[in-house]
């Protein structure tokens, strides 16, 4: 019932016959989860290591059709470091007047804040509990994992938490010959990254594909910096041009948004590229990257990986920023 045989765009290691091939069906876990008609739909964490706080964007859904009030409680603690850190609980009185309520919260982590990097990948788990008040009682619980880290570009160098970092990387072209597809379990990815770290590798480029949740979780735990790319190598066109394909552009844009929305809380996810060896309209791809950067500022973005064919006279390395 799942047919990937005619994707809107050709070319990527997600579908290439040279590596994974274009399999059909579903891998990993798929599920439907029942909730009360009022629930915490999403939480995004934006760490601020200078302010020793994390900005939380909380989205709450209310399908009752009524105006409700409630209490939102937040509690965080480290869970994988030799030095433990429990962040004090905070609570907020909230009003749920619309079907979707967006709440912006600054949650102070404090002076005992633990930072995440390749040598000390300290993680926090945030527990959120929503309880409605009044005659109708609903409860929603949600957990996310985040870390206090800042990955940035300064000139021609990358920095982690204000310190220059040298990326010692590997390109992963979705080569899994024993199965034909990437593993979906945490144990397998931990083994892959532990082997990589034993050789001094601290960075993975996923060449024109996005790995599964288990990969990001393993990289979080072991301090690996990840670069993810859209599943595309080929041209970008502008509206009005002969070969412009609105469905193809929308597919790539929606894929990018879905990847960022799903995985950007992971501290290991630091870089995103629009693809490999792209060509065509430089303006079209620049607009795509500009839109994605406005959508989520946590990542460093690149218009293309390796070089932009047909635009620049000589190949140039991608610039993240």
Image: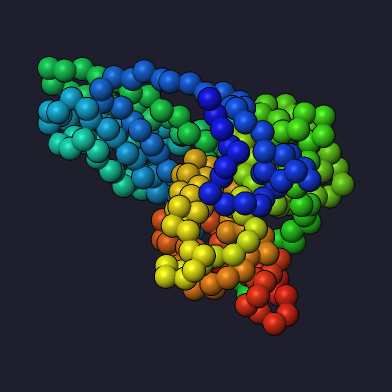
Q: Residue at x 53, y 56 (%)?
A: 299
**Residue at image coords 21%, 35%:** 99
Left or right of 33? Residue 130 is left
Furthest residue toward bottom: 313
Q: Is residue 93 above or below residue 209?
A: above
Q: Quadrant of the C terminus?
A: bottom right
Residue drawn 33% across and 31% down?
A: 40
Q: Nearer the viewer, residue 54 or 277?
A: 277
In screen coordinates, is 233 left or right of 176?
A: left
Q: Position of residue 73 (x, y in %)?
A: 33, 31
Image x and y of residue 147, in percent: 55, 44
Residue visible at 48% across and 44% down in the picture: 258
Give the answer, above or below, for where 6 lies relative to 284: above
Give residue 315's quadrant in the image. Answer: bottom right
Q: Quick check: 258 left or right of 170? A: left
Residue 158 relative to residue 295: left or right: right
């Amino acid at each position: 019932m799942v047919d990937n045989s005619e994707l809107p765009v050709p070319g990527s290691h997600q579908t290439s016959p040279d590596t994974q091939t274009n399999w059909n069906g579903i891998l990993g876990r798929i599920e439907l989860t029942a909730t009360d008609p009022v629930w915490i739909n999403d939480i995004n964490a934006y760490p601020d290591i200078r302010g020793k706080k994390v900005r939380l964007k909380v989205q709450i859904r209310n399908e009752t059709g009524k105006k409700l009030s409630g209490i939102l409680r937040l509690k965080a603690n480290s869970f994988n470091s030799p030095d433990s850190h429990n962040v004090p609980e905070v609570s907020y009185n909230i009003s749920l007047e619309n079907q979707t309520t967006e709440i912006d919260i600054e949650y102070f982590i404090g002076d005992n804040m633990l930072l995440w990097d390749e040598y000390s990948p300290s993680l926090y788990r945030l527990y959120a509990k929503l309880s409605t008040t009044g005659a109708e009682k609903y409860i929603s619980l949600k957990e996310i994992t985040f870390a206090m880290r800042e990955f940035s570009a300064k000139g021609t160098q990358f920095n982690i938490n204000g310190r220059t970092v040298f990326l010692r990387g590997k390109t992963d072209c979705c080569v899994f010959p024993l199965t034909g597809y990437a593993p979906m379990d945490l144990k397998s990815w931990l083994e892959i990254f532990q082997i990589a770290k034993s050789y001094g590798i601290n960075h993975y480029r996923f060449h024109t594909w996005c790995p599964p949740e288990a990969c990001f979780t393993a990289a979080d735990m072991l301090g690996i910096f990840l670069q993810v790319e859209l599943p595309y190598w080929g041209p970008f066109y502008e509206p009005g041009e002969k070969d412009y394909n609105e469905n193809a552009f929308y597919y790539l844009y929606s894929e990018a948004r879905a990847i960022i929305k799903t995985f950007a809380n992971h501290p290991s996810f630091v870089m995103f590229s629009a693809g490999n060896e792209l060509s065509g309209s430089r303006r079209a791809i620049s607009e795509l990257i500009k839109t994605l950067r406005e959508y989520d500022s946590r990542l460093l973005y690149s218009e293309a990986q390796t070089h932009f064919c047909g635009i620049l006279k000589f190949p140039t390395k991608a610039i993240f920023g």
